[in-house]
Image (cartoon, rainbow, N blue to C red):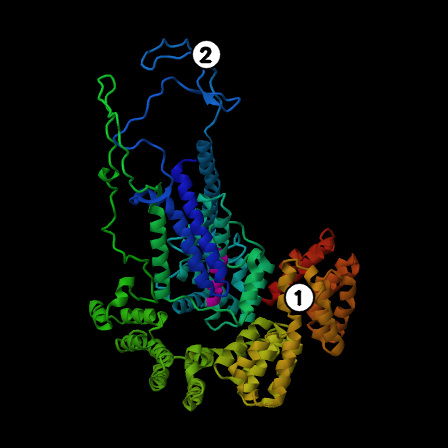
Amino acid sequence: MNAFLAASLVKATLLLFATALALRALVRASAASRHLVALLGLALALAVPVLGLVLPRWEIPVLAPAEEPLPGTRAALPDRPESSDSLTGFSGRVGVQVPPFEESAAPPRRQVPPSLDLDVAQVATLLWLLGGLVPLAALAVGFRRARTIIRNARPAPDPRLDALVADVSARLGLSRSVPVLFSPEALVPMTANFFHPVLVLPDAARVWPTERQRVVLLHELAHVARRDLGALLVAELTTAAYWFHPLAHVVARNLRRSAEEASDDLVLGNDTRASDYASHLVGIVKGLGSPEEMPVLAMARPSDLEKRVRAILDPRRRRRAPSRLLTGSLAAVGIAAALALAAAVPGVARPAMAALPEIDDPPLASAAAPAAPCPKSKAAAPKAKTREDRTATEETRHETKLERRVVSWNEKTVPLVVFAANRKQSGSAAYARAKELYEDDHYLESAEAYRKAAELGYREDTAAYNAACSYALAGRKDDAFTWLGKAMELGFDLESYLRKDDDLDSLRQDPRFAELKKAARAARAEGKTADSVRAVRRFEKLTAEGSKNGARWYEAGKELLDAEKLDLSEKAFRTAASLGYRTGASTYNAACALARAGKVPQALDTLDASLEAGFDDPGLLGRDDDLEALHGDPRFAKLRKKAEDLSLGSNLELGVSRLFRRRSAWREEVPHYAAYAKAHPQSGRAHYNLGYAQLLAERPEAALPAFTRALELGYRKPATLYNLACTHARLEEKDKAFERLFQAIDAGYDSPSQIRHDEDLDSLHGDPRFKQALQRAGKDDEEDD
C-alpha cells in the first residue's frame, strides 16, 4: 500500500473512531442528533483522501532525523571495501584489498531467473481497490432494481389519498410534491431516488385504514424533508471505500437506524399516539415481510424493528432535532478538524543546530569528483494552490414549508428589517425566517417574524398560532393569549393543539387557558364545517347499510369525536368494538367520548372495559385531555394502577419479541404473568397474556389451558382462537389446530399474510387444509372491503 493511501487510512480511522465514541456518548440524545454526528463522521472520512490531494501540505515533525554528514563536510572514504558476514553477523574486511580509485574489470554476468517476489504495498493497494468494486457493483444493481420498481409502479387515482399527501407535506414543510405510487413488487413502503424522491407503497396499502396511511406518509415524507436519501448515499459510498473497516460499517448502521428513529420522532410529533404507531409498524412487517436490499429507505425492516418499537414506546426518549445553530457549529468543527487532518503529513523532527566541529583538513575540489550540488531548500519549492477564494460560510441550503424561499446560513445574522427588505416584504420569507429563529431557540425574535408573516397575508392562521407558541416559550403570556385568540379568529383548528402542544405548557396553569379551551371547543362544536357534516353523513350511511366493517366504524368515530359529535362518536366506537376491530382502542375512545360529554360513571366503566379488552398504554391515561373530567374521581387512580399492572402483558411487546424469535427470554417473565392471572381469575386478558408468554417461552403445553380459559371468558375471540391454533400446531395436533384456525377465521380473523408467515403454523404447511384456510381468510377480507 503506498504511503498516501496508508496515511489516508490512518486519518479516516481516527475520524471514524472519534465518531463511534461520540455516538456512544450520545446514546441518550435524540435520534436526529445521532444521525447528524454519524453523517459528519462518514462524510469526512470519505473526503479525507480527496482533501489530501488538493490541500497544501502541513508537515508535522514526528519522524526521527536520518544520520547524514553535516553541511560543509564530506564522508570519509574507506581504505578498503567492507562486506557483511551474514552467518556470524560480523562486519569487517574480507577478501583481496582493492585500491580505492582503481577500476576493476566487470565480472561476467550470470543468468538469474526472473524473481517471483511481489511488492506487498502494491498488492495491498490492488486488493483495496478491487474489494471496493464489489459493494459499488451491488449498489449499482440496487439502483437498477429500484428504478425497475418505480417504472412498473402506478399512481392511485384517489382524491382522498391526494388530499392526505398534501396535508402531510404541509405539516412537514415540503415545498415540492412527492409522487406516491403503488407497486405489487414493493413489500413495505419505501422512498427512492436521490434527486427526485418518489414514495412507493405496496398494493395492500390501497385498503389500509386512513390512520395507517397517514402515519406511513408521515414517516416516508419525513425522510424526504430530512434529506435522508442523500445521507444514505454517503453511507453507501463510505462503506464501499472502506469495505474492510469495521468502524465504517458500525457508524453506517448507526446512521441508518437513527434516520428511521428520527423520522419516527417526526411522526410522533404530528398528533400520533406512540402505541398506535408502533402497532402499525409491527403490522406492516408481519403482514408483508422484509424488503430486499436496495438504496432506498424502507419504512420497516425486521432486523431493526424491535429497537425502533422500544424507542417509540419510551416516554423518556428525547425527540427534538438539534437546532440549526448547533448543527452549523458541529459541522464547522468537524470540517475544520477534517481539513487539518487531511493536510497534515508526517515530517522529520529537526534537531537544534549544533556548533560545527573544527576541520583540520578542509576538502579540496577534484576534477574527477565534482562537488555535489546543494540540496534545494523546501522553502523554495512551489506551493500547492490554496482555495482562499472559497467562502467559509457556504453551507447546505435548507428548503422551507410550502412556497417558502430558501434562506442561507449567513443570513442568520441579518436583522429582520433588512431581511424583509431584501425579500421584498415577502410573507413566505418572513415565515421561513421565523421558523429558523424558532429552531435556534430565539423565541421572541421568532414571534415577531411570525407576526410579520401573518400581517403580510402568508398562512395567517398558522403564523398567528406559531407566534403565540413562540411568545409562550419566551415567557410573554399576555402576548401568547392574544395571538392564540387571533389564530382562532382566523380559523385555526385550535382545540386539538391546545390539548397536545408542549410549547404551551407555560400557559396551562393560567385561568385564561381553561377559558380558551372551552371557547375553542365551542367554536368547533357550533361551526357547521364541512368536516363535521361529512362525519355525520358517514355515520348515517354506515348505519343505513348495516356495515360490518369495524375499521370504517372506527374511522367514523374518530371523525365524530373531532367534530364534537360525542354521542354519535361513542356509538361508532362501540360498534367497531362489537365487530372485533381493535377492541381495546375502540372501547377506550368510547370512554373518551363519554368523559368529554361529562358522563363520568359511564366513562369509568367503559375505561375499565377497555383495559380488559386489551388497551395497553397506561401513560396515556394520565396525559389524555379527553379524560380530564375523570381525574378527580378516586376510581380513576385505581384504573391507572390496573393499567400499569396489565401492561406487563403488553401484546405489542409480546408480538415484537415473537417476531424476532426471542422466545427463551420469556421463560423468566412467565411467573409475572402467572401471578397476575392467579390474582385475577376472571380477567380474560390476564389469562391470554399468560398463554402468550408460555407460547413464546416454548411451552405450548402450558399455554393451552391459559388460552382456553381466556376463550371461556370471551377475551378477543378471533385472536384467542388463532393462538389456540398456533398452540395445537406446536404440539403437532394438526386436526385440532385446523379446527381452531377455521373457527378463528369464522370469528373474524382475516390476515392471510399472518397465517402464511407465522412460524408457529409451520407444521401445517404441507396439509391441503392450510391452503383452504388462506383462501377463506382472504375471501373474508375481500368481503369486508
In this view of the protein, which residue sits in the foreground, 115 or 281? 115
Vertical position of residue 36 compared to residue 76: above or below: below
In this view of the protein, which residue sits in the foreground, 91 or 590? 91
Asked if the stretch drawn in magenta spans residue 652, the answer is no
Position in image of residue 43 (x %, y %): 40, 51
* Chain part drawn in magenta: 256-265
The residue beneath circle 1 is 749
For the C terminus, the image quarter is bottom right
In this view of the protein, which residue sits in the foreground, 263 or 780? 263
The residues tagged by marks 2 and 1 sit, at their Cα atoms, a distance apart of: 86 Å
325 sits left or right of 93 in the view = left
Position in image of residue 234 (x %, y %): 42, 51
Asked if the stretch drawn in magenta spans residue 258, the answer is yes
Q: Nearer the viewer, mark 2 or mark 1?
A: 2
The answer to whether marks 2 and 1 mark residues whose Cβ atoms lie closer than 8 Å is no
Residue 277 visible in the snapshot? yes
Vertical position of residue 569 compared to residue 213: above or below: below
Crowding around mark 1 (Cα neighbors within 10 Å: few <14, some 14 to 19, many 20+) is many
In this view of the protein, which residue sits in the foreground, 712 or 72? 72
The residue beneath circle 2 is 111
Query: At x 42% / y 51%, what residue is drawn?
Result: 15
Badge 2 element? loop
Crowding around mark 2 (Cα neighbors within 10 Å: few <14, some 14 to 19, many 20+) is few
Query: At x 75% / y 58%, what residue is drawn?
Result: 730
Vertical position of residue 455 compared to residue 268: above or below: below
Mark 2 residue type? Gln
